[in-house]
Image (spheres, coloured by chain):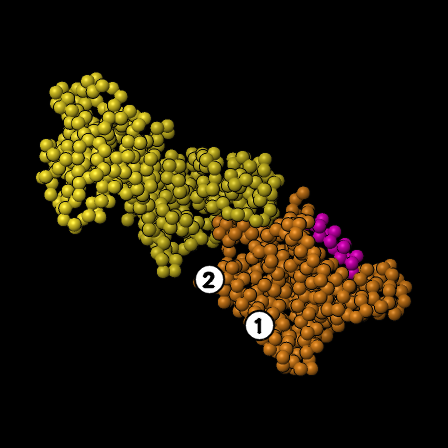
Chain colours: A orange, B yellow
């Protein structure tokens, strides 16, 4: 079976799984809604574009006023569904479920890339300090009551990307960035930022609860605008990574070999690191620090589909989406809301230990 | 400085596959390569040899473009590899890395397919041409049967072949190999190098860093000996692998001979010379009579000297092989005065001198005369002297002197007797050291053998007089020093 066939087959299967998980999850909550009803609601909500109209104008900073293209949609289905159920699914549960899917997708993608990039099974998306950076930005915003454009998410995203870049600069010398140095610089910067976060926590006073909640990773209060933001941000970096999957494979052989096989090693590393960091930052900035998704999911998928990133990358991303939707469903379905980061760690750590004991965890 | 030979051959000036022109490179403050210039002709197999840290691997990394030189240029097939993109350079030069610990479990076929990376565009699909290259590379290296096994699950020798297959799939005119035989068993070492030789016979140009000098000498058309980042010597194996070069590059004593089976240049490294370990023994032999003694004594850890022998004599070869300090004279020539003086000095330095069951003629009589002056003398006798004396009365006269203070032993007793005498020598040397400065030394109390009488004419020297009359007292000479 060719690589392309395998990638397609696995991806289709995992997409189906994701859809199933989403439908089931949307039915679970204080009010139980049968999957059939959920499916009807979702089918109703699927818009089919039928045309484009240019109405009104948007003022863009550079281009000035341009006509805004507006897609015209129709819904082909008209199932009869009770209105409360429709509102619960579409307005309450679906944003959160979709956000979970997107965040899981992003974290598993970044985790896969980082593990391959560092040739280290313990690498996770935040290895170069992205999560700590996001946390500093977010915590500072909350504690200092800063008012900045794009709010908390914007601050977290910017500080995450800046942190990754600083770590990269610290680890680079003469145009080369040894991954071992990068790893250590990442650890050092994370430790330093940990101190900053602790200090900010001491100053937090009444906002302590809010800060801790953010830090533990959360999807509660997800909005359609957050979903929209990730939907806009993620596709391009993801495609870029998929296009470079073959280079990532060759990099697994070691940088010296990769160079001998015609890979521009430093340039490829920069691109992979930057892209994976942006993907991680986007996820972390809306959901806080959700651990273990980016670590465990790529390992699980590597066991299933092998080390070839052309298959591993898309399947890992889809599986990450399903995993986080499932764990978040657990997090919100109990009596009291638990931060989803707690659930992923509680599920992920034992599973990881199980893999470790059965010696099935291999280096990427 | 160019080490290229003129004319044809591996270092041909005409259209070289690889040309290094004054390449210098520093890593940090350390100069790793110092104006290295080599031309490698198309279709030749060049071995890079030299001690650890000589710059072999660095040179290979400079050749494949991984390291850019500070000065000089590297041209492969006329192109400056450092001006090319990594992809373009990888279409000219393929590198077989030192077998590393592979931790990913790609199937073997996938690893070989990665060799096609430099030939594929990012959005280009897999083409028939790629398949053909991969299949041919796998056939060539006999890894087809492993194609679907994870590369982590094959043996070291097989993995080496997989990496060579990957390099072949690159379809480059130049192939670099970094220690291709390191960590392989002897069978796989030979198979690997045979494979490279075959490729070279088909027109590939190969450059390999090889630790094993004998494998390098046997398989390579030419060798480049690096030492301290410089080329110490370059050319065909026989001109590069000389004892002098090896001493300078490796700081090691080695003996260069011809391998009896393959006829290749053959290097035997010797342990650091150990005058004080077990003692020093001089062997007088010839025509193969001394070979056994030389081997036995060498194995027992004695520092050896031998001679004088005719160049080409069986014993001379044996002496070289065990790294003995050898005095030679040209073939068919008698032992002249210079050689005799050289032998005397070695006999003098030796703790024990052994005279083998040698045939004696006018030509080598001088050897026996010199031996007769030894402090401690052992005669190995298998035949009566009359049967091997071709020097008439002179021969008998010398033999008499040898018999007078030499111990005659059967070949099998040689080691034990030499060992005992060497111990004596040590003890006496210790005594004389302890007593130095005390005015006069005591007489030897350890003379178990033939008499140790006075050496009245040997004041303050631990060497003996060369006066023939005093030879008998030689072994006591150093006891009366001072």
Task: Please give the range of residues in magenta.
Answer: A7-22
Residue that numbered label 2 is attached to: A175
**Magenta stretch: residue B442 in it?**
no
- Above or below residue B324? Residue A90 is below
Which residue is located at x 41 percent, y 55 percent?
B68
User: What chain is tagged by disc 2?
Assistant: A
Question: Residue B445 occupies which quadrant of the picture?
Answer: top left
Tell which of B43 and A148 is nearer to you. Answer: A148
Q: Which mark is residue A193?
A: 1
Question: Residue B275 occupies which quadrant of the picture?
Answer: top left
Image spot of residue B169 (x, y percent)? 52, 42
Query: Which type of secondary structure does the marked residue at label 2 adopt?
Result: loop
- Residue A29 seen anywhere in this rendered image of the structure: yes
Image spot of residue A41 (x, y percent)? 84, 63
Same-subunit check for callouts 2 and 1? yes
Query: Which type of secondary structure does the marked residue at label 1 adopt?
Result: helix
Q: Nearer the viewer, mark 2 or mark 1?
A: 1
Left or right, B27 with reference to B370: right
Left or right, B460 with reference to A133: left
Tell which of A110 and B85 is nearer to you. Answer: A110
Gap between marks 2 and 1 measured at Cα? 26 Å
User: What chain is tagged by disc 1?
Assistant: A
Question: Residue B460 occupies which quadrant of the picture?
Answer: top left
Q: Dot 1, crowdedness within 10 Å: few (<14), some or many (≥20)?
A: many
């Amino acid at each position: 079976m060719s690589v392309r066939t395998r990638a397609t087959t696995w991806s289709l299967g995992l997409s189906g799984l994701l859809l199933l998980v989403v439908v089931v999850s949307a039915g679970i909550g204080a009010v139980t809604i049968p999957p059939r009803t959920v499916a009807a609601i979702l089918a109703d909500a699927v818009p089919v574009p039928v045309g484009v109209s240019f109405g009104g104008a948007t003022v863009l900073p550079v281009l000035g006023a341009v006509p805004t293209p507006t897609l015209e949609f129709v819904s082909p289905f008209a199932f009869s569904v009770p209105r409360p159920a429709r509102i619960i699914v579409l307005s309450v549960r679906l944003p959160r479920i979709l956000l979970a899917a997107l965040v899981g997708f992003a974290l598993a993608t970044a985790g896969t890339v980082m593990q391959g990039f560092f040739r280290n099974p313990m690498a996770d998306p935040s290895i170069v300090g992205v999560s700590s950076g996001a946390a500093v930005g977010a915590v500072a915003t909350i504690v200092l009551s800063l008012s900045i454009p794009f709010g908390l998410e914007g601050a977290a995203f910017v500080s995450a990307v800046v942190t990754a870049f600083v770590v990269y600069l610290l680890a680079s010398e003469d145009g080369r960035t040894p991954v071992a140095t990068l790893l250590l610089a990442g650890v050092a910067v994370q430790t330093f930022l940990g101190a900053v976060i602790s200090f900010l926590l001491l100053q937090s006073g009444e906002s302590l609860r809010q800060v801790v909640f953010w830090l533990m990773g959360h999807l509660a209060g997800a909005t359609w605008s957050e979903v929209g933001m990730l939907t806009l941000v993620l596709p391009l970096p993801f495609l870029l990574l998929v296009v470079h999957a073959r280079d990532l494979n060759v990099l697994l052989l070691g940088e010296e070999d990769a160079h001998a096989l015609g890979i521009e090693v430093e340039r490829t590393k920069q691109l992979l690191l930057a892209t994976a960091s942006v993907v991680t930052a986007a996820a972390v900035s809306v959901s806080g620090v959700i651990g273990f998704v980016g670590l465990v999911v790529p390992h699980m998928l590597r066991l299933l589909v092998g080390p070839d990133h052309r298959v591993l990358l898309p399947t890992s991303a889809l599986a990450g989406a399903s995993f986080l939707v499932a764990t978040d469903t657990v997090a919100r379905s109990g009596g009291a809301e638990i931060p989803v980061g707690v659930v992923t760690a509680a599920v992920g750590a034992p599973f990881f230990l199980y893999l470790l004991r059965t010696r099935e965890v291999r280096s990427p | 400085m160019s080490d290229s030979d003129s004319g044809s051959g591996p270092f041909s000036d005409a259209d070289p596959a690889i040309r290094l022109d004054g390449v210098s490179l520093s890593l940090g403050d350390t100069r790793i390569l110092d104006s290295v210039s080599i031309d490698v002709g198309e279709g030749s197999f060049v071995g890079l040899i030299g001690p650890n840290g000589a710059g072999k691997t660095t040179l290979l990394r400079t050749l494949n473009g991984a390291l850019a030189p500070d000065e000089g240029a590297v041209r492969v097939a006329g192109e400056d590899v450092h001006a090319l993109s990594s992809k373009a350079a990888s279409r000219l030069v393929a590198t077989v890395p030192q077998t590393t610990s592979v931790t990913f479990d790609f199937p073997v076929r996938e690893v070989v397919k990665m060799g096609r990376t430099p030939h594929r565009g990012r959005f280009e699909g897999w083409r028939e041409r790629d398949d053909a290259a991969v299949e041919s590379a796998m056939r060539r290296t006999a890894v087809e049967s492993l194609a679907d096994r994870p590369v982590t699950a094959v043996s070291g020798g097989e993995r080496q072949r997989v990496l060579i297959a990957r390099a072949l799939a690159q379809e480059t005119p130049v192939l670099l190999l970094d220690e291709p035989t390191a960590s392989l068993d002897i069978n796989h070492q030979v198979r690997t190098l045979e494979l490279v030789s075959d490729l070279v016979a088909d027109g590939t140009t190969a450059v390999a860093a090889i630790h094993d000098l004998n494998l390098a000498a046997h398989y390579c058309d030419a060798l480049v000996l690096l030492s301290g980042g410089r080329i110490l010597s370059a050319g065909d194996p026989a001109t590069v692998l000389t004892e002098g070069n090896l001493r300078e590059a490796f700081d090691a004593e080695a003996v260069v001979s011809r391998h009896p089976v393959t006829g290749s240049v053959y290097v035997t490294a010797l342990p650091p010379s150990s005058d004080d370990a077990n003692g020093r023994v001089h062997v007088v032999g010839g025509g193969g009579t001394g070979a056994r003694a030389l081997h036995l004594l060498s194995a027992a850890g004695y520092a050896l000297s031998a001679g004088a022998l005719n160049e080409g004599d069986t014993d001379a070869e044996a002496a070289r092989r065990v790294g003995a300090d050898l005095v030679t004279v040209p073939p068919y020539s008698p032992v002249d005065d210079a050689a005799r003086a050289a032998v005397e000095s070695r006999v003098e330095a030796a703790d024990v001198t052994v005279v083998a069951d040698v045939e004696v003629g006018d030509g080598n009589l001088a050897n026996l005369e010199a031996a007769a002056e030894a402090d401690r003398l052992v005669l190995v006798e298998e035949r009566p002297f009359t049967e091997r004396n071709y020097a008439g009365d002179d021969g008998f006269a010398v033999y008499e002197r040898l018999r007078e203070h030499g111990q005659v032993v059967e070949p099998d007793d040689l080691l034990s007797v030499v060992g005992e005498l060497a111990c004596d020598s040590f003890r006496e040397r210790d005594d004389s050291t302890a007593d130095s400065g005390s005015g006069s030394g005591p007489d030897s109390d350890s003379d178990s053998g033939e008499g140790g009488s006075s050496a009245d004419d040997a004041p303050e020297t631990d060497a003996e007089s060369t006066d023939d009359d005093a030879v008998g007292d030689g072994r006591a000479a150093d006891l009366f020093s001072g």
